[in-house]
Amino acid sequence: MRMYDLIMKKRNGRALEQDEINFMVEGFTNGSIPDYQMSAMMMAIYFRGMNEEETLNLTMAMAHSGDVLDLSDINGLKADKHSTGGVGDKTSLVLGPMVAALGVPVAKMSGRGLGHTGGTIDKLESFEGFSVDISTEKFIHNVNSIKMSIIGQTADLAPADKKLYALRDVTATVDNMSLIASSIMSKKLAAGADTIVLDVKTGSGAFMKTEQDSVALAKEMVQIGKGAGKHTVAIVSDMDQPLGFAVGNALEVKEAIETLKGEGSKDLLELCVTLGSYMLFGTNNAKSIEEAREKLYGTIEDKSALAKFAQFVKAQGGNAAPIYDTSLLPKASIIEEIVSEKEGYVEHIITDEIGIVSLILGGGRETKESEIDLAVGLVLHKKVGDYVKMGESLATIYANDKEKLKAAKERFIKTYSFTSEKREKPK
Ligand code: URA
């Protein structure tokens, strides 16, 4: 079999067979298929698509490209959650500790930033010393002892997705339904949890821009999860504006900490409670969604979720001091306000562009080798439906480089549109 022939087959719009997909995933994982051929294949898949059978075969090949974790040594049903990617999406940092504080084992495999969206692992590295590169034994031990651990993909766990994810990130091949479904579900299946809750984003900051496409993606992933014997639920949530206010790694960690302290944004907390309630219900830890919601709000009130977050960060080698003093998080050297040149109600925010503004500042990767600047990003002060006066601040921008700041500001100012008519705040 030759990769060249498979690229040609897909380029010409034909479906790949299971043995061809296995050959491609194996070869890419062991290095015999180079990045440039896989990039061409990703672009062919982007334009030609994959049918359900191909998507399932790709998912299974990637899930089995390394070990599949056996979490049977962890007591109780294990829950995992994954987002399809958004802007300002710091949900896992809040939701994981809330669920774990209630004694439900959270065994999660996370990723890094992708395209215009941020990644949980990059954000967590804002804590000095924190690592997701831990052994399977330690992962299982931590979930058993403190009820929460997050790992990244390694040479042992879903390595095919790790390599492919990094390649898609820099070749404009992220926003394809089959590639997203197989990427997410291969990780979820390899990480071994019993209950999987998927947060499928929809809107201008999501990879799926329309509700119809988002629902189709959600259905496809739920079907793969159920087929693999996992209790799988998907929530479709709004990403037509950033979630919360902060966008950028350390800035999002700060907002997550504030939310765990009960002082954060309401939309973020509402989404965490909704997703968390299905994690609790799906692991038989609540009799109803309403009961689960109440329990989750309780972890914010009694600060047990905040304490759990600190315990989790320490258990993975991180310095947890910033949780109690957020001024210890990485700091940018330049802080500026961006003021509105118009007046009116915010009608729309081009949300993927906000993600790109953060990327331009250094908060995301331009190439596979790019180093991330954890301190940069922006904090919005106005969201959809808010009234803005001329000269009022729309956002505070955090930068470490004047040239990048200039480019980011020019791009940011085009992301907001205004209307003179009062506009409902989106749900
Ligand atoms: N999250 C993933 O893990 N993979 C994707 O392709 C998109 C979002």
Image (spheres, helix red, strand yellow):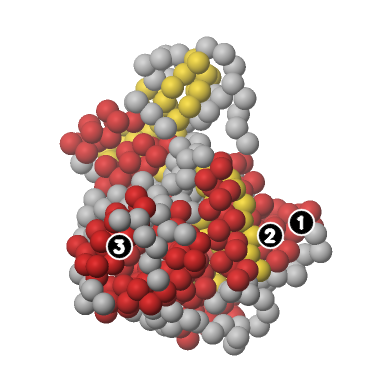
Return the residue nearer the eye: 221 or 55: 55
Relative horizontal placement of residue 373, taking residue 310 as reference (left or right): left
Report x, y in % for residue 75: 65, 83
Is residue 255 in view?
no
User: Percent position (x, y) of residue 77?
Assistant: 67, 76
Give the secondary structure at mark 1: helix
Residue displayed at 21% across by 77% down: 32
Of circles 1 and 3, the one toward us is 3
Q: Earlier in the sequence, mark 2 or mark 3?
A: 3
Picture residue at 24% right of the left edge, 50% below the top: 366
Q: CA–CA distance between discs 2 and 1?
A: 7 Å
The residue drawn where x is 32% and y is 60% is 10
Q: CA distance from mark 2 to mark 3?
A: 41 Å
Query: Which SS class for mark 3?
Result: helix
Q: Are marks 1 and 3 in contact (CB under 8 Å)?
A: no
What type is the residue that disc 2 sits on? Tyr
Dot 1 amino acid type: Ile
Observer able to see residue 247: yes
The crowding category of the residue bearing disc 2, from other C-alpha atoms within 10 Å (few below 14, some 14 to 19, many at least 20), is many
Mark number, residue 235: none
Q: Earlier in the sequence, mark 2 or mark 1?
A: 2
Quarter of the image for the N terminus: give it: bottom left
Horizontal side of 171 relative to 414 (left or right) equals left
Q: Is residue 64 above or below residue 411?
A: below
Is mark 2 in CB contact (under 8 Å) with mark 1? yes
- Badge number at residue 289: 1
* Residue corresponding to mark 2: 278
Whether 235 is drawn above or below 406: the answer is: below
The numbered disc on residue 9 is 3
Quadrant of residue 34 within the rendered picture: bottom left
